[in-house]
Structure formats: structure tokens, C-alpha cells
Amino acid sequence: MDGPDAPIPVNIITGFLGSGKTTLLQRLLASPRLSNTAVLINEFGEVGLDHLLLRRIDGETRVLESGCVCCTIRDDLGAAVRDLYSKRTRGDVPAFDRIVIETTGLADPAPIIFTMMADPVLKYHVRLGNVVTTVDAVNAPLHLAANPESVKQVAVADRLVLTKTDLCDQADVAAVRAALRDINPAAALYDTSQTFDPVELIASDLHDPDRKAAEVAHWLEHEGAPTNASRHDHDIYSFCLTFDEPLDWTAFGLWLSMLLHAHGEKVLRVKGLLNVADLAAPVVIHGVQHLVHPPVHLDAWPSDDRRSRIVFIVRGLERGAIERSLAAFNGMADRPSKAA
Amino acid sequence: MCGLCGVLGGDTHWSESASAPDVFANRRATVTHRHERLRRAALANTVLDHYGMSLRDWQGASYVLATRTGRTRVIDNLAALWPVANDLAGRVCDPLDPTLIAALQGARRR
């Protein structure tokens, strides 16, 4: 949906302490294409930001009853975004067309994502855009080994930005790249020592009709590449499941909702291109922990390969169990079932 | 509201066609809101049978989840189904549970 009432994209910039989040934000805000962006930050750091629509947010959180850590409402953040949107509607602030949230270095991004997608008011006015995670190449091995937050920040990213590579030798940079690929092969990886348009990080996503096919193609680029969780101290790893038979959408919805309810804390991301029985066009799904976005479709299959492919980034779940489970659920759709 | 069934829509779950009408607009066969819900409940029953529960559509707007001993709860959609099912079953309804997978595979062979 385009136009003035279209949901406003919200981008999250996260990354461990000192990884260059604010420097990246400065580069983004310097672009004329992002001049109508509102910015919410947790703390004013050493890097100065001079922007018209800059707000500070505090850190109050509320855990939902029976909720897990990712299902935490950030009351402060929800209130800040609602307030901004309300002022935009009244004309008290310029009509921004994007919101960027910079998290603290130690933040788990999942509650921020949950707040944007589950807030009863916000979910009609904003949508989640790309999550961008900065990674300090010098300290990444230490951070990834010692700080589960930094692994999660990498796992939920749509874009990874490697910083300070000019301070490392090439072998170290290659090792960091391999580590990031093991955790999140579906995220596009950028290097600040190389030239790129920073606007690409956030302005191009699954909701961009001209770019969504390329976005999905990138997810699946590494589908065959094995990842190696054993070389890290954490048990987060990724894999891609492929299914030759078309998937039954109703059975798939039952299965994924049940999986995410039982194991959502361990399913950090799920992204897929599905061949859905009864539909000619491929269906794209993506989710973060317990949250799944409404599906979108591509106009055509990106290649002759019509298999369903689903990329999972999980913590400690067994690939084979997930594969068998989905196959069993899909199989039950082939036979007469009990009356409702 | 579904034009064919005359049912008002509630909070839409991502798995429902109504969450992404453009995605499901070009189905090869016509699927009404009511038909979609009945089929969802029927497939859910294959899974819920393993836990001694069943699901039925109620007026195209809610679902009723029931145990064999007659305990019932009304839910809106799949997001609400699993926490309530866990509560009524007294255990986590886990799709990775090998006994559930075996039961679904066994049911398929029968």
C-alpha cells in the first residue's frame, strides 16, 4: 500500500558497543533521500547527531504475562513512536516517511521488533523495515564468543555492516565474515571500507516491489552452504530446508504457529520462498522469533527451481526434527481429516 | 467482512488469507472465509487429537477448543490456540515431539 496512509517503515540499527552504529546513522541521515526520517535513540553518544527529528527514549520495559524475553513490550518506545506519529498527523512535526531506531549496544533487538509489530495502535501505522546490525571486525571474535546479545543482534539482521576492517588483516576479516555467515547467511553483508550507498541498507526491502525478488534471491543464495556452529561457543546456526512437494498453506500456518509458540525463543529468524498448492505465484514468508509478517508474493518464480525453500536461524534446535515435523504436517493435508 | 459468508473479520492472524488478500487473490479454486476456517479446524483436529482435544469453528468469527472431558475455551485465531491448548492439555503442544510426528505419519498411512 502506497500513499500518505501507508504504514511507515521503521528501521532498527543495532550492534555491539563501539561497533559504529551512530557513525552509520550519521552517514544515513546525510543522504537527501532520508531527509524525512525521524530518529529515536537510547543514548546520546560521543558522535554528535544533528537532526531535526531526534528523540531520546528511556528504558522502561514490561514483560507480557506468560511471555518470553522477546515478547516484551517496550512501553517507552511504543509511547515515543505513538507520540511522534500523533504529532505528524496533527502537523506539529514534519511529515516524516521513515523512523530509524538506534538501540543501545547491549540491547536485545527482539523486544523492539515485538513492540513495533504487536502494539495494538502502531501495527496499523508502522511496519518493520530492515534491521541493520553493525559489527566491529576488530572485536567481533571476542563479542560473539562472550556476549549472547551480539550473536542475537547478528542473527536477527537483514543487513550486516562490518566496520573497522581497515584495522584488521585480511585473514581476520575473512574469519569474521565466515562467522557472520554461519550465524546469518541470509543477511546482505556490507563493509564500510568499501564504497556503497548507505541508503541501500534501509530503503530497499521486501515491501519494495522493484527489489523484493532480488531480496529473496539473496536469502537463498547460500542455501546449499553448510554452516558450522561447532566452531563457535554459541549454539546458534542456520540451515535451509527444501521441499519438492507444494506446501499446503493451512497446514503450514498451523505448523509454524505451533512451532513458534513452542520454540519461538529458539527460532531467531525464519525466511522462506514457498510453493503453495493452489497458488501459481511464490509466497514469501519471514518472521523474527514469535512474530511472523503477513506473507507477500513475488510476481514470478526467480528461476526454474520451484521447490519451497525455508531458511532458519535457530538456537539449539535440531534440523532433522524441524524437517520431519513440517513434512508430517504437510502430509496430513493430503488426506481426509476429522470434521471440524 | 467476507462478501460471500457475511462474517465480520476480527484480529487477523498472518496465516489467514485476509492478512494478505493480494497474495491469495489468484487461487486456482474459490475459497471462502468460512471454508478456510472449516478446513483449518479440520487439519488442527488431526494434531489436537493427539492431545485429546478438538477444535470447531463458531459462527465464522471464533473457534471453540474442547477437551474430551468437556472443558471448552473460545479463541480468536491460531495465535491464541496454542497457549490455550497447552493450558488445557497440561503440557506443551510441541510439533517437534517425535510421538506427535509418528502419530501424524501413522494417521497418513491409515
Image (tube, rainbow, N blue to C red):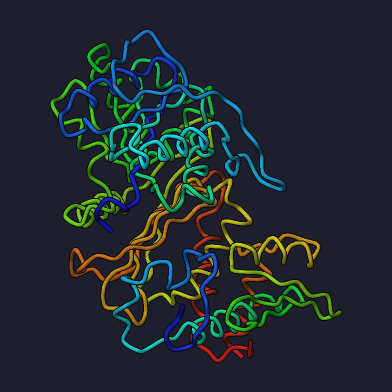
Pick out the residue farthest to the right. Answer: B69
- Figure quadrant of the N terminus of chain A: bottom left
Q: How many numbered dots are placed on residues in this image?
A: 0
Judge whether A163 appears above or below A309 on screen.
above
Residue A42, image x, y percentages:
47, 22
Q: Residue at x 56, y 56 (%)?
A: A260
Q: Quadrant of residue B27?
A: bottom left
Judge whether A118 appears above or below A258 on screen.
above
Judge whether A324 appears above or below B70 on screen.
above
Residue B25, image x, y percentages:
31, 78
Between A34 and B106, the one nearer to me in the picture: A34
In the rendered structure, the answer to whether residue A295 lies left or right of residue A207 reads right
Judge whether B34 appears above or below A87 on screen.
below
Between A114 and A122, the one nearer to me in the picture: A122
Q: Quadrant of residue A76?
A: top right
Pick out the residue farthest to the top. Answer: A46
Q: Residue at x 55, y 53 (%)?
A: A318
Residue B104, image x, y percentages:
61, 78
Pick out the residue farthest to the left. Answer: A195
Q: Residue at x 62, y 71 (%)?
A: B101
Residue A218, image x, y percentages:
25, 49
- Figure quadrant of the C terminus of chain A: bottom right
